[in-house]
Amino acid sequence: MRSFTCPSCGNLLFFENSTCVVCGTAVGYSRADRALLALDGRHRCANAVLAGCNWVTANPDTLCDCCALTRTRPADGDAPEAFVRAEAAKRRLLHQLDDLGLPVGDVAFDLLSSEAEHVITGHASGLITIDLAEGVDSHREAMREQMAEPYRTLLGHFRHEVGHWYWEVLVDRAGGHDRFREVFGDERVDYQEALRKHYAGTPELGWNATHVSTYATSHPWEDWAETFAHLLHIRDTVQTAAAYGVRVTGRDIPPHPLAPVDAEPREQDEEFDQLIDTWLPLSRAVNQLNRSMGKDDLYPFVLSPVVLAKLRLVDSLVVGARP
Ligand SMILES: [Zn+2]
Ligand SMILES: [Zn+2]
Ligand SMILES: [Zn+2]
């Protein structure tokens, strides 16, 4: 995430701010400018109160681009706090997709609460369903323990599910199946059967030499979605560190294990190498910072050479989609 500046006094502001805490100027996020701007002549999103949205619109009483992507939301009064949290995560997601230059296309969201009905977080050709109960800490933490996951967040769900949409866009529609299968395996194996097997069994020993999470081992589509989410985790966190001048330079930074490169180095390969060279020492340092506060690791994952090769492919397709 970038850092932001008050348009009136120059104070540091954050992505979620709707007022400058120093000079009191009312501000809102303009998607077109990717900046926090003073309201003059602009209007708050119609969901400003309901969804805690700080984005601006050109016309009064209209939804901002991000809120407008929500096709279904709970009835007024149902799960209001979880809805606010989900919309906040969705704004971060959309901001990052814009930043990466990824076309948002037909993406839409059903934000439903499993407290009111049966909800399965998932995707269907760009229609993403998110269980709002995942915005309730006690529920999400119980699910995390049940699934034996080291990390589970609303933002992570959004990044994973939208990753399925970008498989359709960047691989399927682009005809990139051969390259995908070389790195991720053949996605034509039965998906439902693969998921059933995954949930019935225990992960194979040594899974983390080839996959970023146990769920990624279930099927090449899930491996892609998990890897896509990790690319977004890494790119966002590296951008945040840069925005605040955080650099890790100390204490014997070991070189990262080299990812296998299958072709002539391209410009984006160098950019990817730089990203990973920044990320590995940074993630080690922030993990230690978290431990100093008695918290679990910020990034409790291992990026093996095989996983790095997967990340490199996803990154090259994302970078290649830039307008
Ligand atoms: Zn200010
Ligand atoms: Zn909005
Ligand atoms: Zn998935």
Image (cartoon, grey):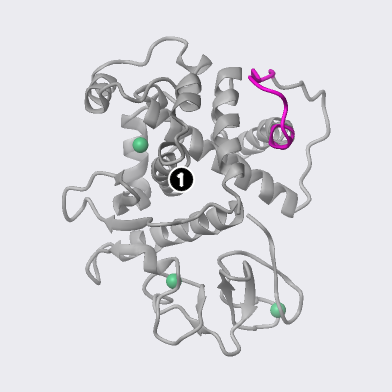
Q: Residue furthest front?
A: 175
Please tell me which residue is depicted at 55% across the width and 59% down the height of the picture.
95
Please tell me which residue is depicted at 24% across the width and 64% down the height of the picture.
74
Q: Is residue 149 left or right of residue 286?
A: left
- Measuring from the top left, give residue 88's x and y in whole percent: 46, 61
Residue closest to the eye, 110 or 154: 110
Q: Quadrant of ligand 2?
A: bottom left
Residue closest to the eye, 144 or 279: 279
- Measuring from the top left, give residue 67's x and y in whole percent: 40, 68
- Measuring from the top left, give residue 144's x and y in whole percent: 37, 35
Magenta segment, which residues?
257-271
Q: Is residue 279 above or below residue 62?
A: above
Residue closest to the eye, 164 or 279: 164
The secondary structure type at the circle numbered 1 is helix
Q: Is residue 130 left or right of residue 321?
A: left
Please give the residue where the numbered disc 1 appears in the rendered image.
159
